[in-house]
Image (cartoon, rainbow, N blue to C red):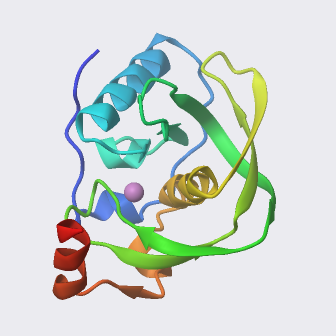
Amino acid sequence: MAIRNIVKDGDDILTKKCRPVVKFDQKLHTLLDDMAETMHRANGVGLAAPQVGILRRVVVIDISPEQNQVLELVNPQIIAFSGEQEGNEGCLSFPGQWGIVKRPNYVKVRAQDRFGEEIEVEGKELLARAFCHEIDHLNGIVFKEVAERMLTRREIDSMNAS
Ligand code: CO
């Protein structure tokens, strides 16, 4: 496994639409392993392949505090959602920036695992938010574009102080 560079704000790759994965081979497995390691090292709860420079529909998510329950989603699609939540959202590609983003409170996703088997996963609250945020990345959409507004410097400072 290896840590990969995280693409940052201003890089065009974050605005590109990703292609589906068609080969469930060792190269994909290495990408998934590297993405999980990179996400954990950066203390993130999710990472999408374009954030490491790969324009493929691949996402890893880990919202557990112990950070060892990695969800691997290949070619994920939202197939159901309900409710609404509004809260702070950040992104490993936009360090130090936070926005208030409305998301569904419940989301169900159909995807494939690393071997190409179809899986369905569902989540609410933070996990539902992570599904939406990461799948947006695969379509070239970053949270700043869908945020109600971005937090001010002052708001971020008081968030860090509490
Ligand atoms: Co992000």
Residue in the image at 23% along x and 45% along y: 6
Where residue 15 appears, x then y in whole percent? 40, 66
Q: Is residue 83 left or right of residue 137?
A: right
Residue located at (78% from left, 27% from top): 118
Q: Using the image as rendered, state which of residue 130 and residue 111 is in the foreground.
A: 130
Report the image quarter containing ligand 1: bottom left
Q: Residue 59 location, x and y as percent?
A: 51, 40
Give the quarter of the figure containing the N terminus.
Answer: top left
- Residue at image position (59%, 18%) is 24
Who is closer to the viewer here, 138 or 59? 59
- Quarter location, residue 74: top right
Quadrant assignment, res 149:
bottom left
**Residue 47 spot, x, y in % from top left:** 41, 44
State the residue at coordinates (40%, 20%).
Answer: 33
Q: Is residue 140 above or below residue 42?
A: below
- Extreme top residue here? 26
Q: Is residue 83 above or below residue 33?
A: below
Judge whether residue 27 can be spotted in this image. yes
Whether 110 is drawn above or below 8: the answer is above
